[in-house]
Image: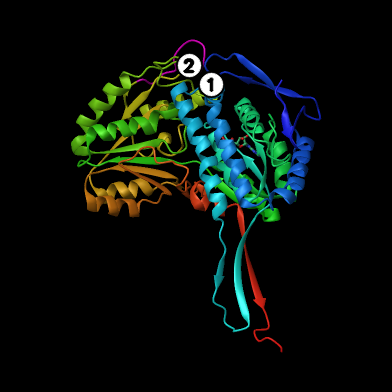
Amino acid sequence: MSKLYINGRWSASETGREFNSYNPANGSLLDSVADGNREDTANAIHAAEEAFKKWSVVPAIQRSDYLMACYDSMIKNQDLLAEMITREQGKPLKEAINEVGYAASFFRWYAEEARRIYGETLPSNAADKRIVISRQPVGVVAAITPWNFPLAMITRKIAPALAAGCTVVVKPAEQTPLNAVTLFKVLEECNLPPGVINLITTSQPRDVGEELLHNPAVKKITFTGSTDVGKYLTKEASNQMKRVSMELGGHAPFIVFDDADIEDAVNGVIASKFRNAGQTCVCANRIYVQESIMDEFISLFAEKVNAFSVGEGFKSEVDIGPLIDKDAIQKSKNHIEDALNKGAKLITGGKQINGEGNFFEPTILLDVAEDMYICQEETFGPVAPILTFKTENEVIERANNVPYGLAAYFYTNDYSRSIRVSEKLEYGIIGLNDAIPAVAQAPFGGMKESGVGREGGKEGLLDFLETKYISMKFKNECEQ
Ligand code: ADP
């Protein structure tokens, strides 16, 4: 059985309860995991609170060394970590290896940034006053993470938190607890002081969440997941005015203009739509193709999608692994059925693949319209809905006409259009002829209902810091 990690020690839950983690490719049992509850969470918060007193005053250069050690340890254990991703989350091993590299890169970047938490001095209004601005860690942070990037969504939060001087309690998703446990075992090699990072695995997110939300020692909630849960956490966190960072759902438009390099655009759509079997919050959800290039685009796209191999992620030829669970399969089915009922055309795919595991055919739908569910909710599956458009102004208006604002992509070779469209799209992340924009040094996050705050880059560090203003009055003439 895998255990909880509290105050530098592995322990069972206070209740002794456990839950199971399964492989989505074949339904087999992977291991049982300690089922943390409120009391365990309170213990972890207490450990983090005690550790904060010392960690927050560790010199930046030493915090930086610890973070660099975390990076090295992840890279050294890349295979172990990647295999656990594929086993428990399902993505193909080559994608899992990429995730480990991406996840580790946050430790490296924030190891470097830990030493650049600068303050400021401002001109005062009086000769006998000085104004100093300094930055201090917010305190104990609760990190609630999803299953689709079971390592990267943890490191993207804890690396900047630790760099800032915060301590952390992590609550991973119930579908991928063993990934979090494996990561913590790898990080244990780095001898972080006890209590700096703590892990509560649980099958009862609401219970654990209540403690994280109501315990006054927690000063910030950082969350990646659905918009509904994000709104609930934000409301509850406001009772104590806890800081929040929310990375929520998206509904990314992917626009292909008629002046684009079509093959490049097709490859981009494929990378964006089918990575992780379409289970990413930044994946293309509405693919807008300009009318005059539709035939050429569709034939190339369908040819490439038909060549995909779907299967268990450890097989080297596999491009698309299983979906996370039966609900995910059902959602893809519902979206396809609704779209077909409302007039969409099926170009390829459309069904669950028979047999064990949660496999779904990569699917292309044509003649999709905005009144279909698929254009309103995230599908989180390998289903590519294609819409046509005539003009630039029209497509911008349609692309913006959703409550979400996480990522948007467009392909064009027109310089002026590149600037116009980048500025008009109401999205936090724009991929201009680039389908995979996320990197550690850039601020990742959404506008509108896709969230608040940014992760990555210097903005990602500021979100774990309080700004303090010290107004200093002094005798500016010496008495002699
Ligand atoms: P998804 O639909 O992708 O599973 P969720 O928003 O349900 O997204 O889950 C993301 C994370 O939020 C997971 O770690 C999950 O356990 C957690 N979570 C879900 N509901 C709550 C809640 N009420 N309180 C705290 N955490 C929650």
Who is closer to the viewer here, 445 or 255? 445
Crowding at label 2, few (<14), some or many (≥20) Cα neighbours within 10 Å?
Answer: some
Q: Residue furthest left?
A: 292
Q: In the visual, does 76 lie left or right of 214?
A: left
- Where residue 187 appears, as percent x and y from the top left, is 63, 33
Q: What secondary structure is the magenta-colored segment mainly? A: loop
Amino acid type for the residue under numbered disc 2: Phe
Q: Which residue is mark 2?
A: 314
Colour convention: rainbow
Q: Residue furthest bottom?
A: 480
Q: Mark 2 and mark 1: span between their CA atoms?
A: 8 Å
Image quarter hosting the N terminus: top right
Q: Residue at x 39, y 37 (%)?
A: 436
- The segment highlighted magenta reads 349-358
Q: Residue at x 38, y 44 (%)?
A: 408
- Where residue 205 appears, as percent x and y from the top left, is 67, 35
Residue 83 is marked as 1
